[in-house]
Image (cartoon, rainbow, N blue to C red):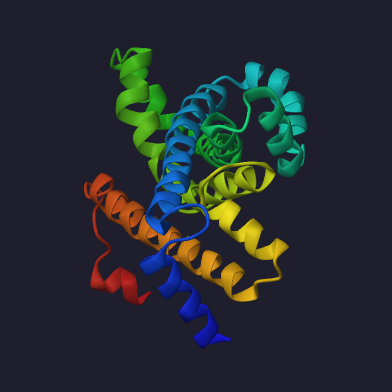
Amino acid sequence: MPSAIWDKLVIWFTEGTSQGTIWENIAVTLEEAVLGFVIGTFAGVVLGVLLGRSRFTAEVLAPFIKGANAIPRIVLASLFVIWFGLGMSSKVATAFVLVFFAVFFNAFQGAREVDKVLVDNARILGASRWDLMRTIILPSATSWILASMHVAFGFALIGAIVGEFTGADKGLGILINHAQGNFDAPGIYAGMLITTVLALVAEWLITKLERRLTSWRPQPTAQAAGL
């Protein structure tokens, strides 16, 4: 089986696929995933932090948010195809939904966990709401948000591929779907392997971003590390 998977990869990268070159298909899936990831992360952070700091609004909207999160993603993917067609929009929408909820709940909890004493002291010193958000709330919630981003891009890839399963012209999802229809196990594993590599590269990039954004934090001392 490993040799058959390797042979399939060689064919895809040298001779192309039935849906065009493998690079075209990778580019389509990546574009869908990245768009869904960026939009979903932005929306999740904004709404998560805002609701995390507004307890009344959060309690009012909680049943609706939990209900929306309970809808099976495959059902949403089918609905998005009906609403937006077979183009890229339906795949981006599916990726967006998966990313949004993953980031939203972490951002929400991160905003809730902000030190109240620190916020009260800043208010006494005359800090405005924007000052609180910029200097205290967002930095405090950063670790929660970044933790969700590690899994969010994987969800974005899943959303894009699931969307391609429901209908597409190009993409890794359609390649895997065709391989499944032809009982082509090496093709399925080859598509999964490419998807895994893309997710690992994204994980590496997000880890680099996390280290850069949290470089202001003091590093643990050797004594603390040994405790």
Quick check: 209 left or right of 177? left
Residue at the image position 52 percent from the left and 23 percent from the top: 53
Quick check: 78 left or right of 106? right
Quick check: 16 left or right of 58? left
Tell me residue 8's x, y (percent).
50, 74
Tell me residue 40's x, y (percent).
50, 33
Pick the quarter of the image with the C terminus.
Answer: bottom left
Residue at the image position 56 percent from the left and 43 percent from the top: 169
Residue at the image position 64 percent from the left and 16 percent from the top: 57
Pick the quarter of the image with the N terminus.
Answer: bottom right
**Front-most of residues 87 and 133:** 87
Give the vertical position of 9 relative to 150 (above or below).
below
Tell me residue 140's x, y (percent).
39, 38
Give the vertical position of 75 relative to 205 (above or below).
above
Give the vertical position of 101 relative to 183 (above or below).
above
Give the vertical position of 186 relative to 3 (above or below).
above
Callout count? 0
